[in-house]
Amino acid sequence: MNPAQFTVDSRLDGDTAVIYPKGYLNNLAGESLVAECGRYTGKGIRKIVLNFGGTGLINSIGISLLLQIIEDLRTIEGTVCFSNMSKFQVDTLDMLGLLKHLRIFPAESEALQYLGAGAV
């Protein structure tokens, strides 16, 4: 997929930003995703759900930028949850040894429920 076709949509659900990356997550796309997360954290939002339902492939640089988002949230004592990931995406993160550092939910609603229960 052409990087120009990558988009990031988002919405606010209470005190949680829900972000929808769509397309191939690589270095250029990942930077726009990091910027979108930063837009919310800059406004004091400390809870983010990344819904990967529209994301196919994530390359190694895309994964490193996801790690940057995780670290950015940890720095401000925030929480990021991943949702709607494909089995391939979850298996890739598992192979890299990252699952123990991530909160992954099958559905966005489950991630929002987790964060709504006061998890930070």
Image: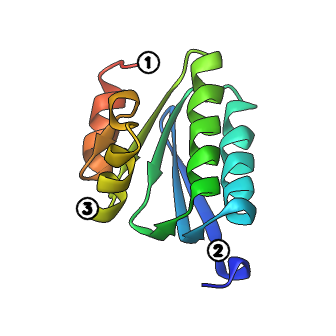
Residue 36 spot, x, y in % from top left: 69, 50
**Three-letter amino acid code of the residue under disc 1:** Val
Give residue 44's quadrant in the image.
Answer: top right
The residue positioned 64% from the left and 74% from the top of the image is: 6
Report the disc number at residue 6: 2
Q: Secondary structure at mark 1?
A: loop
* Contact flag, marks 1 and 3 (Cβ < 8 Å): no
Circle 2 or circle 3, nearest the eye? 3
Q: Is residue 53 above or below residue 31?
A: below
Residue 112 spot, x, y in % from top left: 34, 39
**Three-letter amino acid code of the residue under disc 2:** Phe
Residue at mark 3:
87
The residue positioned 44% from the left and 18% from the top of the image is: 120
Q: Nearer the viewer, residue 86 or 21?
A: 86
Q: Quadrant location of the N terminus?
A: bottom right
The residue positioned 64% from the left and 71% from the top of the image is: 7
* Contact flag, marks 2 and 3 (Cβ < 8 Å): no
Circle 1 or circle 2, nearest the eye? 2
Earlier in the chain: of badge 1 and badge 3, it is: 3
Q: Nearer the viewer, residue 92 or 36?
A: 92
Residue 13 spot, x, y in % from top left: 47, 43
Residue at mark 1:
120
Q: Is residue 3 above or below residue 14?
A: below
Q: Is residue 87 above or below residue 113?
A: below
Earlier in the chain: of badge 1 and badge 2, it is: 2
